[in-house]
Image: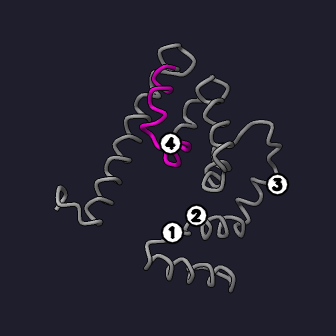
Amino acid sequence: MPDNVNQTAAFKAAEGLKKHNLDISSLVNIEKDLSDSAFLDVLNKSDFETLDKNILEKFMPFLDDVSKNNLFEKIIDGELDYHFLEIYLPFVDVFYVATQIEAAIIEGTIDWDALHILRKASAERMEKLRKELKEAGDPRFQ
């Protein structure tokens, strides 16, 4: 449960909007993170010369499409570790980027283990789609 009045208001708004299938949990979570002294300490100590996975993970829901594309290019070009795919893939259409990831693996710019990350993200995306279709009343999933 949130500690201060602002977090309580955000939490209440998130719960209310959730009733209408509107999700602002990312906003509530970042508000909590920015109130956490340990996370603030990590932010203050970071020089941002090297991208920190833990920091990026917190801000990923707020990146625009251009920023997400820039991140993806750095991953498939091998400038960033392929493990950043774990943070990136939940925020994009996995099926759209799969071919590019596979090509980068074949070219040798990222490790073959990235296929495991891709397959896991694909499976999670399929499960999410199945759930959404079932909740929407699709007869194929009843």
- Marks 4 and 2 sit apart, C-alpha to C-alpha, by 16 Å
Q: Position of residue 34 (x, y in %)?
A: 72, 65
- Direction from residue 3 to residue 128 in the image, left or right: left
Report helix, strand or loop for mark 4. helix
Residue segment shown in magenta: 87-103
Q: Residues within 10 Å of mark 2 (few under 14, many from 20)?
A: some
In the depicted structure, whether residue 105 falls above or below residue 128: above
Q: Amino acid at mark 3?
A: Asn
The residue to which callout 1 is attached is 23
Compare residues 43 and 72 and report the one nearer the observer: 72
Q: Is residue 105 left or right of residue 47?
A: left
- Label 4 vs label 1: CA separation? 19 Å
In reply to whether residue 15 is colored magenta, the answer given is no
Q: Which mark is residue 89?
A: 4
Q: Which residue is mark 2?
A: 26
The answer to which image quadrant residue 59 occupies is: bottom right
Q: Are marks 1 and 2 in contact (CB under 8 Å)?
A: yes
Residue 44, numbered circle: 3
Give x and y (percent) for residue 95: 42, 37
Callout 2 amino acid: Ser
> Magenta span has 100?
yes
Pair 3/4: label in front: 4
Residue ID at (62%, 67%): 27
Asked if disc 3 and disc 4 are in contact, CB closer than 8 Å, the reply is no
Q: Earlier in the sequence, mark 3 or mark 2?
A: 2
